[in-house]
Image (cartoon, rainbow, N blue to C red):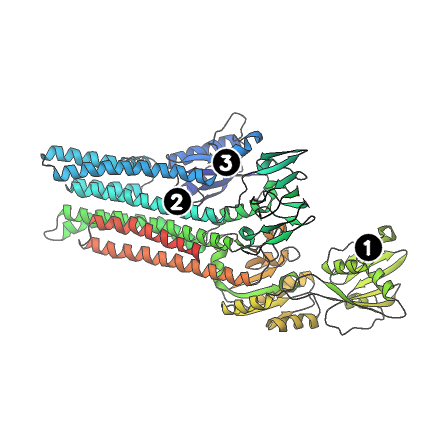
């Protein structure tokens, strides 16, 4: 996406209909100068980009379009929580920095839910008043005219908003929504003089809508509770004083104070104090993590038992907690194929059923002897009530969003519903070795000099050659050398990918790398047979000897591989740049039967291409790596899974799924969440379509009534939403 066109994000307060969300998304996409229009129903967020030069006019047109499509929606800026207001300098009005703390409080998720609760109470009062009028018209002995007045008053009290929205939508050319369907159905009941039933249907439809709103709100609140990791404030240290400020106002380099029981608001390094941290909100792990001066802590941790001082390393916009919140909240914007299918299905399904209802009302009375228009209009009204696809278009996004929230609670970030669904089709998992299956913490175990050189000489030459390398092997060599490296002695360094390093040190040429490096420079060396990573060293064309460096397998790697096999993964393949002997040794210990060894970085992509060529059409291949060195392979795979992603910007950017605590068994947990989510989504599809099909048939044959049709519509929606929420407990 172009960085020259920043993304605008507006909250659609009052959005309680998935059909309405789809309508707004499509409507805004048609505004000239707008691209990437998306509406996230679960977070009620409209996001879009403006590509035209006259941004102010385009934003105004977007605002007008939304208010035309959904007049009851209030537009708020997501960043500030304030109502969208376009001022004269062609920008959207935003909150000033000094007011940031109050703004953060005003946009707290609980305040948004309070608005919905107030609306629900108002609706219930109206419906109670409508029921009194309805019962009065049914049971108080009045003449026909007065009874009709009471029924009309009861109908308007219950459904005036439904009728008004239907009229406005018709004027804007939008026919096939739930307001239109209910209005036509109840008007038809009035036409055939079924007054009590017309009013009762509208009342119970509205009651059903209230329960539906409550269910959707509850699911949103439950998922928000799972991700309640956003810090409310930061304790900024200024000299001898401590000020409570909004995290957004703190800059990198500032010092903040974390008291026991408080959330860490920003990523930083501990400079004073020792404590234990509850990391469960990020990693899903209940075991506390001890921290001391020099350790890095991430935003979202909870300080358990001692006062800490931190130096902030990143502003809030770049902090771990902000990235996680953005990922989870925006994940459902990437729709799964099932969601996309249901959205398209709903667009055609409702008009088809409306046309069928018209035919049902008109054709039988013309063709069947004794058939009356009143009878068949009534049956057509049942068709109209049942045809609303709300159960499908609401419960399916709720199901996927719940699955993403459930995964997040386990320390697994899934970047989209599409990736969550794709996990069900995994048949191949390709795993990087270093840092994924092994700890990536190398230790220098043996120093074996040759040709009369001493251990100290060999170690010093290797340490100086690796002085500028960031590879873990280089770290282990420098750590063992444990002396100050005088970098002015190093006059040239040439890193040769897949081979090693050529350096000029105090006027001497030093080579440090693998056997291929020695062969490349025609060094007469002795090939070692040790099991581990070997670093051969030569100076001025003379072989000095080799270093043996070993990496250890993670404690949970074998368990993770075993769980993946139980989850139905048919092919687990390991890739490594290490020697054939080391790679096969690690693979054998973990029960991996296929391994690619001695791979250069670009050869890993070639190996993945080979694996991708084997899969069947509907199968998926995932690559599991550390998200930094393996970025090309992560990007090329069907699903990129980053291990060691805790705080790693590269991992979060490159991968589709991020395992926050670097544990291989969590991949099997992600597969389980994906399986449970798909199961619940398909339960809802079958439930909704099955019950609607039954009632459509019953209605066509005159067996079902309008009352039962309301249950088939709204009741099924509520049941489907409640069923979708079960994923949060799986």
The answer for how far apart the CA atoms under marks 3 and 2 are is 20 Å
Element class at badge 3: helix
Q: Quadrant of the C terminus?
A: bottom left
* Residue 533 or residue 367, whichever sits in front: 533
Q: Is residue 341 above or below residue 177?
A: below
Of marks 1 and 3, which one's residue comes earlier in the chain?
A: 3
> Disc 3 vs disc 2: which is toward the camera?
3
Locate residue 229, reporting x and y percent: 53, 46
| Left or right: 22 in relation to 558 | left
**Residue at numbered disc 3:** 105
Residue 493 is labelled as: 1
Q: Residue at 20% across / 37% down in the picture?
A: 132
Q: For mark 3, does the 10 Å Cα neighbourhood hold few (<14), some (14 to 19), or many (20 or more) residues?
A: some
Residue 359 seen by the camera: no
Locate residue 619, reporting x and y percent: 50, 64
* CB under 8 Å between discs 3 and 2: no
* Residue 38 or residue 443, whichever sits in front: 443
Of marks 2 and 1, which one's residue comes earlier in the chain?
A: 2
Q: Is residue 296 above or below residue 549?
A: above
Q: For mark 2, does the 10 Å Cα neighbourhood hold few (<14), some (14 to 19), or many (20 or more) residues?
A: some
The image quadrant of residue 196 is top left
Residue 275 seen by the camera: yes
């Amino acid at each position: 996406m172009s960085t020259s066109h920043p993304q605008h994000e507006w909250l659609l307060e009052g959005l309680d209909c998935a059909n309405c969300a789809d309508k707004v998304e499509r409507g805004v996409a048609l505004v000239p100068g707008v691209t990437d229009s998306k509406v996230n129903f679960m977070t009620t967020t409209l996001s879009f980009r403006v590509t035209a030069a006259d941004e102010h006019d385009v934003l105004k047109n977007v605002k007008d379009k939304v208010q035309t499509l959904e007049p009851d929606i209030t537009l708020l800026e997501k960043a500030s929580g304030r109502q969208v207001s376009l001022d004269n300098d062609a920008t959207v009005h935003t909150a000033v920095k000094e007011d940031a703390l109050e703004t953060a409080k005003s946009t707290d998720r609980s305040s948004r839910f309070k608005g919905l609760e107030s609306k629900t109470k108002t609706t219930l009062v109206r419906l109670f008043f409508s029921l009194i009028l309805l019962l009065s018209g049914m049971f108080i002995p009045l003449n026909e005219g007065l009874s009709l007045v009471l029924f009309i008053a009861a109908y308007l009290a219950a459904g005036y908003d439904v009728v008004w929205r239907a009229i406005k939508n018709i004027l804007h050319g939008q026919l096939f929504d739930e307001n239109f369907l209910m209005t036509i159905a109840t008007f038809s009941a009035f036409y055939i003089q079924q007054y009590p039933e017309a009013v009762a249907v509208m009342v119970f439809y509205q009651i059903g809508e209230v329960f539906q709103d409550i269910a959707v709100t509850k699911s949103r609140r439950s998922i928000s509770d799972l991700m309640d990791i956003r810090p409310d404030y930061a304790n900024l240290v200024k000299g001898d004083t401590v000020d409570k400020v909004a995290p957004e106002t703190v800059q990198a380099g500032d010092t903040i104070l974390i008291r026991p029981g408080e959330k860490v608001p920003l990523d930083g390094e501990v400079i004073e104090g020792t404590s234990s941290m509850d990391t469960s909100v990020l990693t899903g792990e209940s075991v506390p993590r001890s921290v001391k001066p020099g350790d890095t802590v991430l935003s979202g941790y909870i300080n358990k038992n001692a006062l800490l001082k931190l130096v902030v390393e990143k502003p809030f916009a770049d902090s771990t907690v902000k990235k996680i919140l953005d990922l989870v909240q925006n994940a459902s914007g990437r729709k799964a194929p099932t969601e996309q299918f249901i959205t398209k299905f709903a667009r055609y399904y409702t008009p088809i059923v409306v046309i069928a209802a018209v035919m049902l009302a008109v054709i039988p009375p013309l063709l069947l002897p004794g058939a009356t228009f009143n009878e068949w209009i009534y049956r057509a009204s049942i068709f109209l009530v049942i045809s609303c696809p709300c159960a499908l278009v609401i419960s399916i996004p709720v199901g996927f969003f719940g699955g993403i929230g459930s995964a997040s609670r386990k320390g697994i970030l899934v970047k989209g519903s599409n990736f969550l669904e794709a996990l069900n089709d995994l048949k191949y998992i390709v795993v990087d070795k270093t840092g994924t299956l092994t700890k990536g913490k190398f230790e220098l175990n043996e120093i074996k000099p040759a040709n009369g050189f001493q251990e100290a000489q060999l170690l010093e030459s290797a340490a100086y050659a690796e002085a500028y390398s960031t590879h873990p092997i280089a770290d282990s060599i420098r750590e063992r050398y444990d002396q100050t490296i005088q970098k002015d002695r190093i006059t040239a360094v040439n890193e040769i990918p897949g081979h090693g390093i050529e350096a000029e040190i105090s006027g001497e040429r030093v080579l440090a790398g693998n056997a291929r490096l020695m062969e490349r420079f025609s060094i007469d060396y002795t090939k070692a047979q040790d099991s581990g990573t070997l670093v051969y060293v030569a100076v001025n064309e003379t072989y000095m000897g080799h270093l043996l460096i070993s990496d250890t397998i993670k404690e949970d790697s074998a368990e993770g591989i075993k769980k993946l096999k139980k989850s139905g993964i048919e092919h687990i393949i390991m890739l490594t740049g290490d020697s054939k002997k080391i790679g096969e040794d690690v693979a054998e210990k973990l029960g991996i039967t296929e391994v690619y060894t001695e791979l250069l970085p670009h050869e890993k992509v070639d190996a993945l291409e080979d694996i991708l060529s084997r899969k069947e059409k509907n199968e998926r291949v995932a690559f599991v790596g550390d998200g930094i060195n393996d970025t090309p392979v992560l990007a090329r795979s069907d699903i990129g899974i980053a291990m060691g992603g805790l705080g790693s910007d590269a991992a979060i950017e490159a991968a589709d799924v991020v395992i926050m605590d670097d544990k291989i068994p969590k991949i099997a947990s992600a597969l389980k969440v994906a399986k449970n989510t798909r199961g619940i989504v398909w339960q809802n599809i079958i439930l909704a379509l099955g019950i609607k099909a039954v009632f459509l048939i019953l209605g066509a044959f005159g067996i079902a009534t309008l009352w039962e049709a309301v249950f088939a519509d709204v009741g099924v929606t509520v049941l489907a939403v409640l069923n979708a929420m079960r994923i949060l407990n799986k």
